[in-house]
Image (cartoon, rainbow, N blue to C red):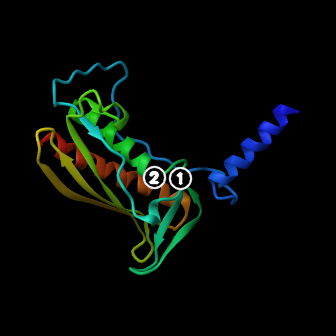
Amino acid sequence: MRKAAFALLACLGLSACFGGAKVPDTLMTLSPAQARAAAATRTAGEGEAITVVVPTVPRELATLRVPVHQSDLAVAYLKNAQWVEMPANLFARLVSETVAATTGRVVLDPSQFTFDPGQRLTGTLQRFGLDATRMEAVAIYDAALARQGGGITTRRFEARVPIAAADAANVAPALNQAANQIATEVAAWVGGA
């Protein structure tokens, strides 16, 4: 009886996470185009590591749904499309993996930065969705790189990928491509800093 009650509560909790609406059959995620090799060991001296912080997002991205900009003043959400977790978290992990894979630097999660945060990469994921007027997946990331000794450098990264149709099957790979393009550019920027 207790197991059945627990299972029922778990299902209710899960439906609350997804707004009580029907969850799509497939959830969207991001996958890095470049990943670290297994068993690769890296060492960083004091101040040499980089900590990648989950970016802040506007309210339209503080959801599991995919925003669709129908104009500069109107936003809807893509039907039958949903992220597996918050897009800012997915984006931060993708950037972390790409920076680690392409620069050879030690990359830390914010929960580990108490060791020695080194440089801190943070920012705002301004756009991450569909531009319906141009039929493009759009990602815009305003990055800020804070050095351990002081000083901050900022830069805007933008990627646009054309899509054939406004559905999850077309938008998911296009957003993944846009995120990877930005992550590669961020890695090059951080690597030169």
Q: Nearer the viewer, residue 139 or 86?
A: 86
Whether residue 75 sits left or right of residue 143 in the image: it is right
Query: Which of the 4 image quarters holds residue 24?
Result: bottom right
| Disc 2, SS | helix
Q: Residue at x 31, y 39 (%)?
A: 98
Q: In the image, residue 139 lies at what x, y percent?
A: 35, 60
Q: Nearer the viewer, residue 140 or 133?
A: 140
Q: In the image, residue 108 lies at what x, y percent?
A: 31, 33
The reply to whether discs 2 and 1 touch (Cβ–Cβ < 8 Å) is: yes
Q: Residue at x 32, y 57 (%)?
A: 124
What's the mark number on residue 83? Answer: 1
| Disc 1, SS | loop
Quadrant showing the N terminus: top right
Near mark 1 (Cα within 10 A), the count class, few <14, some 14-19 or many ≥20, is some
Whether residue 151 sits left or right of residue 13 in the image: it is left
Q: Amino acid at mark 2?
A: Pro
- Image position of 132 with respect to 148: above or below: below
Q: Residue at x 11, y 39 (%)?
A: 149
- Image position of 1 with respect to 160: above or below: above
Q: Pointer 2: what residue?
A: 87
